[in-house]
Amino acid sequence: MKKVVKFGGSSLASAEQFEKAGRIICKDDTRRYVIPSAPGKRFPKDTKVTDMLYSCYGQAILDEDEDTENSFEELLSKIKERYDSIINGLSLSMSLDKEFQIIRENFSKKVGRDYAASRGEYLNGKIMAHYLGYEFIDAAEVIFFDENGNFDGTKTDRVLSERLHNVEKAVIPGFYGAQPDGSIVTFSRGGSDITGSIVAKAVHA
């Protein structure tokens, strides 16, 4: 038997929440494919990482005067602090420095709001895969949209089934996929649930 499990933002908002999710996954060896959301709120007045990413990208696309650039850098630094707190809290020997450098460069190139929003799931997926010892599979490589931004279910099911056929356990970030040119497209907010159902269909969970 194969099972796909999806964890929402509040379930992965901190190191403590990651540990709870990890225990749930490890209680059942058939829970082989994990779909993570981006970190949500840790407390009522906290900000979800996806909203932080939208704000950060909004600053990045403004005219680059000195104040705007500092604001963009500051917001990105705060996002990185959220992830570093999870990594440090789990005592993981990993770094997201390279990923954040790429994100910074792509934000500066104004690659799009969908790309910006998707990085929350992407980064959380990296941490979850490292924490569990599962393979990380970027959703952009296995979930597809056409040139008009419409979900391509046929291609996705074929490629995803082939990719996961010999993968015992994997983490696939929720919420996004890619167009033929590689540009990122997201589902609507809450789209990690959709990713979970797509993966479940592909592996006959």
Image (cartoon, rainbow, N blue to C red):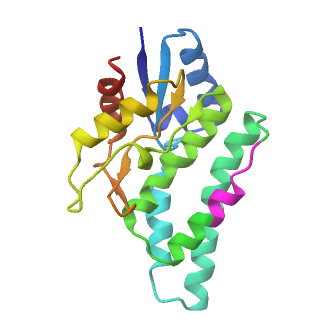
- The residue closer to the viewer here, 162 or 144, is 162
Q: Is residue 109 above or below residue 30?
A: below
Residue 192 location (% of width, % of height): 37, 38
Q: Is residue 131 above or below residue 106?
A: above
Q: Quadrant of the N terminus?
A: top left
Residue 157 location (% of width, % of height): 29, 34
* Range shown magenta: 94-101
Q: How many marks?
A: 0
- The residue closer to the viewer here, 84 or 132, is 132
Magenta run includes residue 74: no
Q: Is residue 28 above or below residue 37?
A: above
Q: For this view, does 13 lie left or right of residue 57?
A: right
Residue 146 location (% of width, % of height): 24, 56
Residue 5 location (% of width, % of height): 43, 23
Magenta run includes residue 96: yes
* Residue drawn 59% across the image and 32% down it: 135
* Residue drawn 63% across the image and 80% down it: 70
Q: Is residue 194 visible?
A: no
- The residue closer to the viewer here, 198 or 18, is 198
Q: Is residue 72 above or below residue 24?
A: below
Q: Quadrant of the C terminus?
A: top left
Q: Is residue 41 visible?
A: yes
Q: For this view, does 154 lie left or right of residue 46?
A: left
**In which image quadrant can residue 72 be found?**
bottom right
Q: Taken as a whole, is the magenta stretch helix, strand or loop?
A: helix
